[in-house]
Image (cartoon, rainbow, N blue to C red):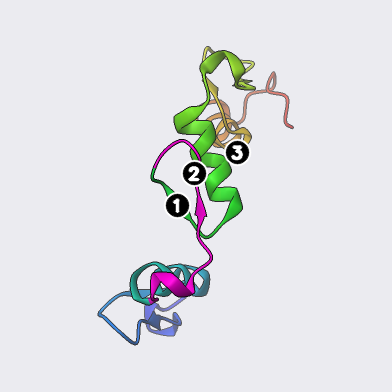
Amino acid sequence: MNPKDVKWFKCEHCPYITKFKPEMKKHTISKHTNSKEIKWIQCKHCLYKTVRKQHLQSHILAKHTSPEDVKWFQCERCSYQTKWRNNLRKHTVTNHINRPDVKWM
């Protein structure tokens, strides 16, 4: 694909550009919308706030959940472990691809 064929989304308010429409929406909400117009979801443990419930859940897991309360995803080939299944998938592809003994989820 020719780079000239890529559709770019340019912010109407600043020089920010992106190839991804959802990223432009997030940018516009976070940078150019009056905060009173946004339905913010506030973390009950700190000052973090977001407009997306999933982002708050990830924040709480990363910042406010003790390691013994986390469901850890463990690599079957090495000692790598993570709080996120998708990170384990990326790790497996990056480090253990084309291995006959790897079990795919």
The CA span between labels 2 and 3 is: 23 Å
The residue at which mark 1 appears reads as 49
Q: Residue at x 48, y 32 (%)?
A: 62
Near mark 2 (Cα within 10 A), the count class, few <14, some 14-19 or many ≥20, is some
- Segment tinted magenta in the rendering: 33-46
The CA span between labels 3 and 1 is: 23 Å
The three-letter amino acid code for the residue at tag 2 is: Cys
Q: Residue at x 44, y 31 (%)?
A: 63
The residue at which mark 3 appears reads as 86
Q: Secondary structure at mark 3?
A: helix
Please check the rendered image and state whether residue 70 is part of the magenta-colored stretch, yes or no: no
> In this picture, is 76 found above or below 86?
above
> In this picture, is 94 found above or below 34?
above
Q: Nearer the viewer, mark 2 or mark 3?
A: 2
Q: Residue at x 41, y 46 (%)?
A: 48
Instruction: Identify the main secondary structure in magenta.
Output: loop
Left or right for 48, reference 101? left
Q: Which mark is residue 105?
A: none
Measuring from the top left, give residue 72's x and y in whole percent: 61, 21
Whichever of callouts 3 and 1 sits on the residue coming sooner in the sequence is 1
The three-letter amino acid code for the residue at tag 1 is: Lys
Viewport quadrant of the C terminus: top right
The three-letter amino acid code for the residue at tag 3 is: Asn
The CA span between labels 1 and 2 is: 6 Å
Asked whether residue 38 appears in the rendered view, the answer is yes
Residue 7 figure quarter: bottom left
Whichever of callouts 1 and 2 sits on the residue coming sooner in the sequence is 2
Please check the rendered image and state whether residue 41 is part of the magenta-colored stretch, yes or no: yes
Measuring from the top left, give residue 32's x and y in whole percent: 35, 76
| Callout 1 touching callout 2 (CB < 8 Å) | yes
Near mark 3 (Cα within 10 A), the count class, few <14, some 14-19 or many ≥20, is few
Q: Which mark is residue 43?
A: 2
